[in-house]
Every structure is written in C-alpha cells, then in structure tokens.
Amino acid sequence: MFIQACLNGNRRLDEHPAVPIGANELARDAQAARVAGASAVHIHPRASCGRPSLDAKSVASAVSAIRLVCPGLPIGVSTTQEIDENLNRRVGTICAWSVLPDFASVNFWEAGATEIARSLRDRGVGIEAGVSTPADVNAFLSSGLQGRCVRVLIEVLWETNVEAALVTADHLLSLLSAANVAEPRLVHGEDATAWPLLRWGSARGQQVRMGFEDVLTLPGGGYTSSNTDLIRAAFMN
C-alpha cells in the first residue's frame, strides 16, 4: 500500500499545535512517517516567519533536513499559487532552487500549470499533476505531459459531501483511464472527505495520502496528536 505523508500543507499552529513548521520539525515528522510505513512525503516548506514559501533557502532547508534523516525517501513540495500568486515569480523561484526535491505537485486548475510543470522538468524535478475536475483532466491531457509525470493526483477538494466526493473521484479516475493515462493515480480528499476517499482509493489499488494537510482528526473524528497517528490509522483503514 502506497501512502504519501502530507505533513503540513498551509495549516497553521492555531489549527493544530503539532503541525510541523520548521525544517527540523518536518524532518522529525518525515522520519516518524517513514517508520510508520509512508512511501513518500509531501511538504510545504516555510520561510522563517512560518508562512509557506517556494524560495530557494526555504526549499533547501526543508529538503536537506529531511534527506539527512531519511536518505532515499522521495520528497515532494507544492507549487500552488496559494503560496505565490505571481506565475513568473514562481517560475523564476523554481529556476533558482539550489537543492531540488524529488517531485513537485502542479495544480491543473491554476493558470500557468503547464509553464510550472515545464520549469520543473527543465530542472529534473518529477511532476505530480493535480486534477480536481473534468476540465483539469482536459488541461492535463492538452499539456503534452501525459506519460512524463511521476503520478496524477485525483484531488477531490471542492466536494464536502462524502457521496458526491466519491462520485467525483470515480468520474475522474474513469476519464484518466479512458485517455490511457499510464501514470499511477493518487486519490485524496480534505477534511470530511479525507478518510472516506483514502478507503475508497486504497480499495481500488490506487495510491493514497494522509497527514495534517488533509485532515486533523482520526477516523470517526477522534483527536490525533501527530502526523504519525494519522499514518498508522491509514494503514488500519
């Protein structure tokens, strides 16, 4: 079972006191997630002020800290416009990275996704192509990147109703299959849909992910003290 640990996202400490912010905290949680069985990690590096950042220093600090304690563990970062709305600046920042992650996620519902993906390819960074709607699937298929990505992320982020989220995930999976997309798929939801979609995806042999970025509670709504608790629960569900 492939579980990617999504350690922090854009979460804040006032949402949960154990959200890892600094590089050493990310490294600690990555190491614990690996011991718990995680196959890869996805992080949002933070600047010294604690805000998500794509700048070279922040990325190098987080990636290097994780590699020091988790050699060989694939490390991914986000490139979402929520971190920086300026497309040209994001592309320039990627070009300036001094330490490269193994892969980075690209949201195909955001403007400039193809440019971001190509800048990653030019740097030798793997691409996770994120799709959330049929229009995103079409954007990905039109990008020329099919067959050149690490995986496709089926990201059900706009549906808060569980049944609707499962229908959306199934439809997106069908569209990718109909287009003969060869890349592995990773299915995930957010908050109320995170655990149902993890179960749905794993039952269908898809990759899944779990961590504070996606949900702050255990299945059934119980309190979780750490990312590690979430990863362990994922293997039990």
Image (cartoon, rainbow, N blue to C red):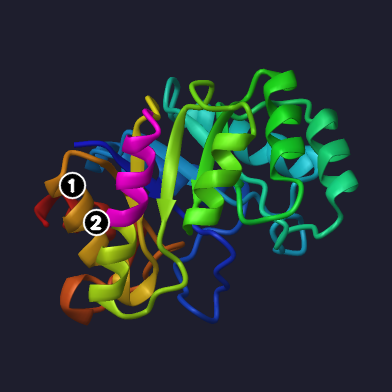
Residue 223's quadrant in the figure? bottom left
Q: Report which residue position mark 1 lands on.
A: 202
Say left or right for 111 vs 2: right
- Asked whether the viewer can see residue 77, the reply is no
| Cα–Cα span, label 1 and label 2 | 6 Å
Quadrant in which the C terminus appears: bottom left
Q: Which mark is residue 142?
A: none
Q: Is residue 178 above or below residue 225?
A: above
Q: What kind of residue is marked 1?
A: Ser
Task: State if disc 2 and disc 1 touch (CB < 8 Å).
Answer: yes
Q: Residue at x 37, y 57 (%)?
A: 211
**Residue bearing mark 2:** 198
Secondary structure character of the magenta stretch overall: helix
- Label 2 packing within 10 angstroms: few (<14), some (14-19), many (20+): many
Q: Position of residue 176 (x, y in %)?
A: 38, 40
Residue at 57 percent across and 40 percent down: it is: 140
Q: Nearer the viewer, residue 42 or 66?
A: 42
Residue 48 is drawn in which quadrant? bottom right
> Height in image: 228 above or below 19?
above
Image position, residue 157 (x, y; %):
45, 67
Depth order, front residue of 94/34: 94
Please name the residue shown 40% across and 74% down the image: 159
Q: Is residue 32 above or below residue 146?
A: below
Indicate whether residue 23 is drawn in magenta. no
Q: Is residue 59 visible?
A: yes
The magenta stretch spans which residues?
Answer: 170-180
The reply, left or right, for residue 59 in relation to residue 211 is right
Look at label 2 and name its amino acid. Leu
Mark 1 lies on a secondary structure that is: helix
Q: How packed is label 1: few (under 14 Cα within 10 Å), some, or many (20 or more)?
A: many
The percent coordinates of residue 15 (x first, y second) are: 50, 79
